[in-house]
Image (cartoon, grey):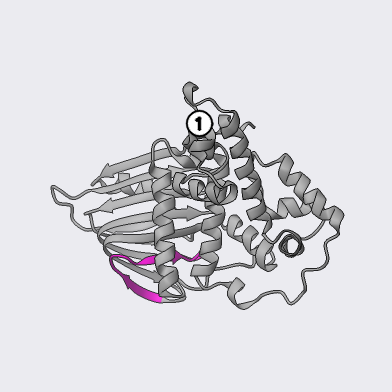
């Protein structure tokens, strides 16, 4: 599929603003998971409001409620993360018991077990990420077999990772809510999903932190490297995963990572970004700004959602601003 056509794939949106218990419960069941909820008595100004935005890769939600409630959810089949922007949240899990969260806190809900919540005057930013994406990243990077990864704790491993994860959730959530959303681009959505998965593996205790494979990466022949580069070059316009490139090269993901670092001084994913940066440069060189071509649009077409970062990377790679290339 041509990338510029994919830009039309806007996120699916849904929302609710209500104080009616049945409406709220049904919305939560459809959007999140089944739940058994008890609501405080509603006053004239109490409301439960949610805005949701979803793409195939992940979903985001903004929850604002002055209607206090408690609930016990059915087991989650996906990873749910949230940031407390305001209010108080108590979360109860089988492994960690009850935890009180206030403004600025972040949390991850465990998969496969019921979770209890008590909400008071809340404002939350939420992300929902498929377990399969975390599995794939863990397998590629750490040789963790699919299905064996699980997050071992609700809270981050350190204060710096807490701050980093909070900022990343707000960035991804905000990008999903934007209209038009940069997440409509499959390339940008894939990069963001990968960033979220890698960050989650470094933020919340899990098997990748405690059980790395003792098997060495192995040797990769020059022919396999050439196949990997050829595959990247032929498919730069669409999302690519490390395991996919490794399969095309006829080797394993970790061995391919080691080979790229040895021969090219970079990782396969960074190599992909460099190829896309070069494609963006070609597009800028041939585009006509008098016909509406812009740096922002060309950057987005090649997977660069943030113009400032694109400009910095472009200038470092080519020694000039992308706006100069476009005008020359």
Q: Residue at x 31, y 44 (%)?
A: 23
Residue 109 located within the stretch drawn in magenta: yes
**Label 1 element class:** helix
Q: Answer left or right for 223 relative to 319.
A: right
As rendered, which of 181 and 70 lies closer to the eye?
181
What residue did someone put label 1 on?
327
* Camera sees residue 156: yes
Magenta stretch: give its range. Answer: 97-113
Q: Name the quadrant containing residue 134.
A: bottom right
Question: Callout 1 environment at 10 Å: few (<14), some (14 to 19), or many (20+)?
Answer: some
Residue 16 horizontal/vertical position (percent): 31, 42
Residue 73 horizontal/vertical position (percent): 41, 60
Q: Residue at x 38, y 65 (%)?
A: 106
Q: Quadrant of the N terminus?
A: top right
* Camera sees residue 57: no
Q: Answer left or right for 204 relative to 215.
A: left
């Amino acid at each position: 599929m041509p990338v510029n056509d994919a830009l039309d794939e806007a996120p699916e949106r849904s929302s609710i603003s209500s104080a009616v218990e049945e409406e709220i419960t049904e919305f939560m069941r459809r959007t999140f998971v089944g739940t058994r909820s008890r609501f405080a008595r509603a006053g004239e100004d109490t409301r439960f409001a949610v805005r949701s935005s979803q793409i195939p890769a992940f979903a985001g939600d903004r929850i604002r409620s002055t209607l206090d409630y408690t609930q016990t959810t059915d087991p989650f089949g996906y990873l749910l993360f949230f940031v407390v922007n305001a209010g108080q949240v108590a979360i109860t899990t089988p492994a960690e018991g009850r935890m009180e969260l206030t403004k600025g806190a972040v949390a991850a809900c465990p998969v496969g077990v019921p979770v209890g919540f008590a909400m008071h005057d809340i404002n939350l930013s939420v992300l929902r990420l498929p377990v399969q994406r975390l599995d794939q990243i863990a397998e590629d990077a750490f040789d963790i077999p699919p299905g064996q990864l699980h997050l071992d704790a609700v809270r981050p491993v350190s204060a710096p990772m807490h701050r980093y994860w909070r900022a990343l959730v707000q960035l991804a959530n905000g990008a999903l809510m934007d209209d038009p959303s940069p997440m409509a681009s499959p390339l940008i959505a894939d990069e963001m999903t990968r960033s979220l998965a890698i960050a989650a593996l470094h933020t919340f205790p899990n098997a990748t932190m405690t059980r790395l494979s003792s098997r060495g990466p192995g040797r990769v022949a020059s022919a396999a490297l050439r196949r990997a580069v050829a595959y990247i070059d032929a498919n730069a316009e669409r999302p690519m995963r490390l395991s996919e490139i490794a399969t095309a090269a006829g080797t394993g993901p970790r061995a391919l990572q080691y080979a790229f670092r040895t021969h090219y001084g970079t990782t396969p994913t960074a190599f992909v970004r460099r190829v896309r940066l070069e494609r963006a440069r070609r597009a800028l060189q041939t585009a006509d700004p008098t016909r509406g071509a812009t740096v922002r649009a060309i950057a987005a077409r090649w997977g660069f959602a943030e113009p400032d970062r694109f400009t910095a990377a472009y200038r470092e790679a080519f020694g000039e601003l992308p706006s100069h290339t476009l005008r020359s």
